[in-house]
């Protein structure tokens, strides 16, 4: 898996709704394509994404083969307090990639 | 041997049908598969219209990356299905208390088809929305 890119506001007002954008570099091999000898290329995708704020799950997504290359996920959330928003991506081969951003509530 | 033009055409037509059917069968999920995917999520419960929004382009030039957005405020879970793909499942969203109940991503569509989103609301009811998307170039390789 590549390096994830996330866009999270650095600060927000308490109770504000903010937009989070995430992009993960990954081929997302769907399992439907065939190589030039006609053999099916085995599926290898990111099958799970989650965002957790101070240990509380905000949202999660189970991804299937129909999600595009370099999966992009955007969502809105409410920020109650200052805290860390942790992101997690899980590959079919079991690799887990994590990153985290701090949001300051002024 | 004397083959009439009519017979030759009928034979050719039959052969064409035989060769075409398995191909189209392998491409798109059958209605049963689609229904099974819906039932697996709803448990066979009744599905209402409204309460959920699905934003898709009317025409997608490239089926490899079609931007879609779902919005269902107050929903616990939302599934996104592509009725015309080999596997209908696209993405299953689950929302916690802090989430606004929306999400957007980019998906692959094998061809022109209906994209369906079904939400499970906090009270356990289900809501559905479907949008037709015209795809110029399919996105499932081959």
Image (cartoon, coloured by chain):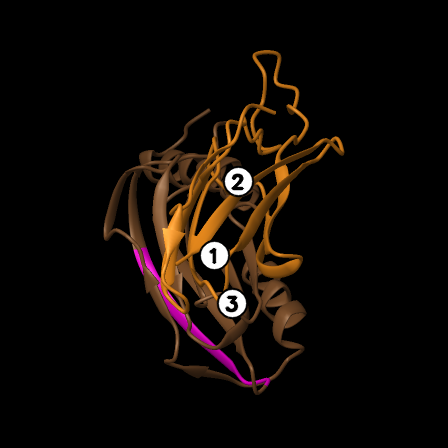
Under circle 1, the secondary element is loop
Residue A100 percent location from the top left of the image = 57, 41
Q: Does A45 appear above or below B58?
A: above
- How many other residues sit within 10 Å of disc 2, few (<14), some (14-19) or many (≥20)? few
Residue with the mark numbered 1: B83
Q: Disc 1 versus disc 2: distance between alpha carbons?
A: 24 Å
Residue A88 vs residue B58, the one in the foreground: A88
Q: Residue furthest front?
A: A106
Disc 3 with disc 1 on a shared chain: yes
Chain shown brown: that is: B
Residue with the mark numbered 3: B98
Residue with the mark numbered 2: B18
Residue at coordinates 47% horizontally, 31% vertically from top-left? A70
Q: Does A37 appear above or below B2?
A: above
Residue at coordinates 40% horizontally, 45% vertically from top-left? A10
Confirm whether the magenta stretch covers residue A13: no
Under circle 3, the secondary element is loop
Residue A49 vs residue B107, the one in the foreground: A49
Chain letter of the residue beneath label 1 in the structure image: B
Residue at coordinates 63% horizontally, 69% vertically from top-left? B41
Asked whether the viewer can see residue B23, the reply is: yes
Mark toward the viewer: 1 or 2: 1
Q: Disc 3 versus disc 2: distance between alpha carbons?
A: 54 Å
Chain letter of the residue beneath label 3 in the structure image: B
Q: Is residue A99 left or right of residue B80?
A: right
Residue B57 percent location from the top left of the image = 26, 51
| Magenta span | B124-132
Disc 3 with disc 2 on a shared chain: yes
């Amino acid at each position: 898996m590549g390096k994830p890119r996330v866009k999270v506001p650095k600060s927000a007002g308490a109770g504000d709704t903010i937009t989070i954008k995430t992009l993960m570099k990954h081929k997302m091999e769907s399992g439907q394509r065939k190589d030039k000898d006609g053999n099916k290329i085995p599926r290898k995708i990111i099958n799970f994404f989650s965002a957790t704020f101070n240990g509380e799950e905000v949202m999660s997504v189970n991804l299937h083969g129909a999600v595009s290359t370099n999966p992009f996920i955007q969502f809105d959330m409410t920020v109650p307090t200052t805290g860390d928003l942790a992101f997690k991506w899980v590959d079919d081969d079991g690799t887990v990639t994590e990153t985290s951003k701090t949001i300051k509530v002024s | 041997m004397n083959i009439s033009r009519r017979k030759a055409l009928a034979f050719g037509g039959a052969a064409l049908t035989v060769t075409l059917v398995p191909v189209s069968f392998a491409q798109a999920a059958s209605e049963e598969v689609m229904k099974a995917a819906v039932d697996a999520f709803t448990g066979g419960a009744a599905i209402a219209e409204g309460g959920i929004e699905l934003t898709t382009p009317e025409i997608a030039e490239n089926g490899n990356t079609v931007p879609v957005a779902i919005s269902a405020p107050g929903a616990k879970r939302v599934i996104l299905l592509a009725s015309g793909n080999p596997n209908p499942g696209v993405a299953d969203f689950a929302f916690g208390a802090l989430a606004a109940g929306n999400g957007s991503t980019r998906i692959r569509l094998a061809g022109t088809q209906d994209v369906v989103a079904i939400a499970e609301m906090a009270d356990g009811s289900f809501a559905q929305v479907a949008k037709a998307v015209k795809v110029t170039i399919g996105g499932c390789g081959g």
